[in-house]
Amino acid sequence: MSDKPAILVTRKLPDAVEDRLRRDYDVRLNPDDRLYTADEMIAAASDADGILPCHTEQFSAEVIGRLPDSIQVIANFSIGFDHVDLEAAKARGIIVTNTPDVLSDATAEIAILLILGAARRAAEGERLVRSREWRDWSPSFMVGTQVTGKRLGIIGMGRVGQVTARRGRGFEMAIHYNDVRPLEAENQLGAIYHDKLEDMLPHCDFLAIHCVATPETHHLLNRERFALLPDGAIVVNAARGSIVDDEALIEALKSGKLAAAGLDVYNNEPDIHAAYRELPNTFLLPHIGSATHETRDAMGFRALDNLDAVFAGREPRDRVA
Ligand code: 8YV
């Protein structure tokens, strides 16, 4: 038997990450990238010392309660940890870590892509060209919303939110933000802080969601809050679907209250609300915020650094429980 810790890796990871896993751990990989059911995952974790999952695996209290006693750590390959019941993990003495910092640039790129794609009607344009339905040009053809110089409101001015703000400034956008506390003065860079979301919304031509998904932020954007946005505003979400009440967003998109929405994340992925697909004014991506070669490698290495720390008896850098 190997004296290396045994790690269950639930999804296919980048080659360089799997190479390091093979070198340092007695690793159980998933080369076919098959999605485990909870029962299969629990069985595959038998006698393992740790699990390296993605957000696609749900660690409810019930699942955590059924994990083998040998599991010391759940080292997530994700910044989000809303798929893990942290209290249940703590109660079983299981350490939980995430992968912050390394995906801020990639996720902010997607937020900017969502802003541009939604504002400039990129999905409609793509469909026209691909379907050969593009017939002519006219001054009123495919006219959208200009981004340059507009006001960008950011909900959640953490690491990703701050990069989106910097990129937005490249488009000469005025930055407003809402968070539990203002940034340190040196990081404000002229951004305007609103301690109440309701106070910020009327100032947002564009609204970018970058806050953490928690019970407190569940359906944070509801009918009442969408109504506070200026008419013709554009909403983008590269954080988590649960922060948005789908029915309220769809209603605002249908009524024209909102000009458009750009979404990379959804409630109930990948089986998303059917209306998003039907609406002409949605720009939709399939949860690819961190999907660059550089970032996926960095996420894997960061998860491995956390595992290494746990098995060396050190405090992991990114402990969330
Ligand atoms: C990841 C994400 O692709 O890290 C996160 O929380 O939402 C994504 O960028 C995914 O979660 C990997 O597990």
Image: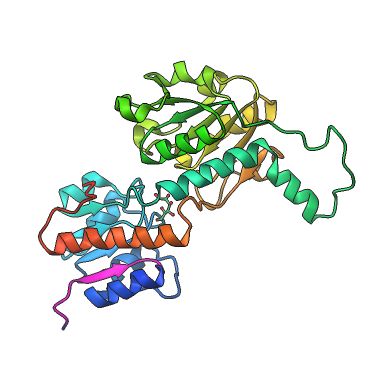
Residue 187: quarter of image: top left
Q: Give the tally of numbered discs.
A: 0
Figure check: 294 above or below 81: below
Above or below: residue 234 compared with residue 54: above
- The residue positioned 21% from the left and 70% from the top of the image is 48
Magenta stretch encompasses residue 3: yes
- Asked whether 244 falls inside the magenta stretch, the response is no
Judge by depth and name the residue closer to the eye, 204 or 163. 163
Quadrant placement of the N terminus: bottom left
| In the image: residue 182, left or right of residue 286 | left
Q: Position of residue 41 (x, y in %)?
A: 33, 66
Magenta-drawn segment: 2-11
Residue under the image location 67 percent in, 31 percent down? 146
Chief secondary structure of the magenta portion: loop
| Along the viewing direction, whichever of 77 and 62 lies nearer the viewer | 77
11 relative to 118, above or below = below
Residue 248 percent location from the top left of the image? 57, 29
Q: Is residue 295 left or right of residue 229?
A: left
Give the image quarter of residue 188: top left
- x and y, in percent, of residue 105 in the image: 44, 47
Q: Residue furthest left?
A: 313
Q: How is the image coloured?
A: rainbow
Left or right of residue 235, residue 43 in this image: left
Q: Residue furthest bottom?
A: 1
Q: Quadrant of residue 116?
A: top right
| Spot occupied by residue 58 in the image (x, y as percentages of width and height) | 36, 54
Q: Establish if 199 lies above or below 15.
A: above
Q: Is residue 145 left or right of residue 70?
A: right
Q: Does the image show residue 25?
A: no
